[in-house]
Image: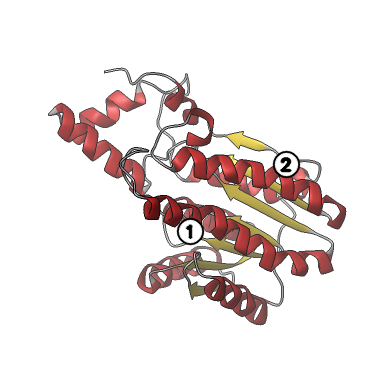
Amino acid sequence: MSVDYGLAGKKAVITGGSRGIGRACAMALASQGVDVCITARRQNLLDETAQQIRDAYGVQVMTVSADMSSDEDVHRMVSTAVAEMGSIDILVNVAASFPYGGTLELSNDDWIGHFGVKTFGYLRTIRQVYPIMQRNHWGRIVNIAGGASRYGGGGSAGAVNAAIINMTKAFSLDLAKDGITVNAVHPGGPSDSDREVLRIQEIAQSQGITEEEAAARQARNIPPIGRRIVSADPANLVLFLCSMQADCITGETMAIDSAGERDRPVVY
C-alpha cells in the first residue's frame, strides 16, 4: 500500500539536484507529484537528470545552472523557479563543495570556499525562498548536513556542517510563526555518492586491496542494518520531513543510521 504524503502539486527547489543525494531527493518528491526545479553547476548533468525524472513521474521539471557561492546566481535561480512554477513550497539544500585535506593542510581560501558554497549557499537560498513561503504561510526546508558536524575531523567539514546544524535550529525558531518547518538530515555517507566512491578508492589504494574488498570492510562498521546506505535512504527521510505528516517536526537533525560509523574506528 502506497503512502500519500499530501504533496501533489507542490513546488520544490533542490540544490545540488543533478546527482547523488540531490537527485534522489528530486526523484522522491517527484514520485509524490511534486514539480521540481533542480540546480547545479553542470548543465549537461542537470538535463540528463531532468529527463529521467520526467520519464519516470511525468511532473514538471526545470533546471537552472547556478553557483551557490554567488548571490546573483541564487537570486536568479529562485526568480526563475518562481516565474516558471508559480511558487516554491519546498527547499532541499544539498549543494556542496569538498576540499580534501586535514585542518592544517587546507588553506584559508579552502576553508572560506567550503563555507561559501555550503553554509552560506544554504543561507542564501533560505533567505531568497522565505518571502515566498511566508506569503503561502506554509513551507518545508531541509538541509543536508554531513555527520562530521558530530565528530569533528574531515578537514573543514566538521565546522561547515556544525554551522548548518546551528543555522537550521535558528531558522526553525524564526520561521515557525509562518508555518515553515526547518530540519536537517545527516545522510550517512551514501555508498553511491561521489565522495564515498572516492573514499573507497582511497582506502583500496592505501591498503593494497580491491575496491570491492574496501567496500566490504567499510560495511562491517555499520550497525545491524547490515548494508551500506544509498542515496535513496536519506531521500526517503527528506520526503517524510517535507510531508503533511511532519507538521510538528522542526528544528531537528536526524541521522541515517550509518552516519554512526564515523563515531567508531574503522574495522579491517
Which residue is at 71% across, 49% downward? 182
Which residue is at 75% across, 54% downward? 6
Tag 2 secondary structure: loop
Label of residue 251 in the image: 2
Task: Check the image and name the residue furthest to the right.
Answer: 177
Along the horizontal axis of the image, is 191 left or right of 63? Answer: left
Q: Which mark is in front, 2 or 1? A: 1
* Residue type, mark 1 in image: Val
Q: Which quadrant of the view contains residue 195? A: top left
* Residue type, mark 2 in image: Gly
The residue that mark 1 highlights is 117
Task: Check the image and name the residue furthest to the left.
Answer: 208
> Sequence order check: which comes first, mark 2 or mark 1?
1
Q: Nearer the viewer, residue 213 or 69?
A: 69
Which residue is at 52% across, 35% downward? 149
Pointer 2 and pointer 1: residues touching (CB < 8 Å)? Answer: no
Is residue 256 shown above or below 23?
above
The residue carrying pointer 2 sits among few (fewer than 14), some (14 to 19) or many (20 or more) residues within 10 Å by Cα, namely: many
